[in-house]
Image (spheres, rainbow, N blue to C red):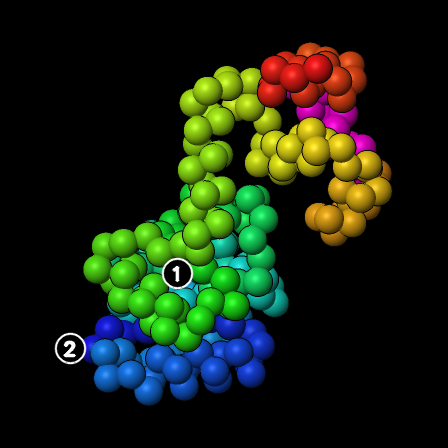
């Protein structure tokens, strides 16, 4: 039996490409295709696909919210994120919601098909740099309890501070306002009980 793959993607050119790629291989059957999470939530449970390939940023509910709802209703279905976003916050929120794989849209066609096979067979396919991000994250969590006090976004911003980036550069990097970055940094200082960048970095990374 072919692996039944459903797609949630709001950009038609991308969903058409994915469906053509997947459907052209006899190992898979492709469909249905949804352009929003709400329709997928409404219709997918009765279809029971083997794998759902979903973007994160969709109109209305996000792909992560969609997975969170559907995973409870379709526990046997494997959810594979396929997105342009590679920031730690999206990666970890997706995994916590129930995704078991995370790849980017730039992945080579054959590797994308391999990722679908892998997740169907019980694997957790990820781009290599995303896998490294996950490994580094859990390594830090084990080695430094101070990081457990911070949200994913706060850890991300603290890491950029450790590399010498300025507030405006950080804001541009994460598509945030400078004031939002300042708010995150104030929250970091409060949670770590420090008063400056140097104190925060010294406490978390043991550096001057």
For the point 33% across and 84% down, the residue is 23
Q: Indicate the position of residue 142 as horizontal and vertical percent values.
A: 43, 23
Report the magenta residues as a range.
180-192
User: With respect to residue 84, does 200 lie above or below?
Assistant: above
For the point 32% across and 52% down, the residue is 124
Q: Name the dominant secondary structure of the magenta segment.
A: helix
User: With respect to residue 102, does 183 lie above or below?
Assistant: above
Q: Secondary structure at mark 2?
A: loop
Q: Secondary structure at mark 1?
A: strand
* Left or right side of 40 for 28: left
Marks 2 and 1 close (CB-CB < 8 Å): no
Q: Indicate the position of residue 120 as horizontal and vertical percent values.
A: 25, 62
Q: CA distance from mark 2 to mark 1?
A: 20 Å
Within-10-Å neighbours for mark 1: few <14, some 14–19, many 20+ = many
Which residue position is annotated with label 2? Answer: 1
Q: Quadrant of the C terminus?
A: top right
Between 13 and 62, the one nearer to me in the picture: 13
Which residue position is annotated with label 1? Answer: 80
Residue 129 at least partly seen: yes
* Left or right side of 90 for 135: left
Between 13 and 32, the one nearer to me in the picture: 13
Residue 70 at least partly seen: no
């Amino acid at each position: 039996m072919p692996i039944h793959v459903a797609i949630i993607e709001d950009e038609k050119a991308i969903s058409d490409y994915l469906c053509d790629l997947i459907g052209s291989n006899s190992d898979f059957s492709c469909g249905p295709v949804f352009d929003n999470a709400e329709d997928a939530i409404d219709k997918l449970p009765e279809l029971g696909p083997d794998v759902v390939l979903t973007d994160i940023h969709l109109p209305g509910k996000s792909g992560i919210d969609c997975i969170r709802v559907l995973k409870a209703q379709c526990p046997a279905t494997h959810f594979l994120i396929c997105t342009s976003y590679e920031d730690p916050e999206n990666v970890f929120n997706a995994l916590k919601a129930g995704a078991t794989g995370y790849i980017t849209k730039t992945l080579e066609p054959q590797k994308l098909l391999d990722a679908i096979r892998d997740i169907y067979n019980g694997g957790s396919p990820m781009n290599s740099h995303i896998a490294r991000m996950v490994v580094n994250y859990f390594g830090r969590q084990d080695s430094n309890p101070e990081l457990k006090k911070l949200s994913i976004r706060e850890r991300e911003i603290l890491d950029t501070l450790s590399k010498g980036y300025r507030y405006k550069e950080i804001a541009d990097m994460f598509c945030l306002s400078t004031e939002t970055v300042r708010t995150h940094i104030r929250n970091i200082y409060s949670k770590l009980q420090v008063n400056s960048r140097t104190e925060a970095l010294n406490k978390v990374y043991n550096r001057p």
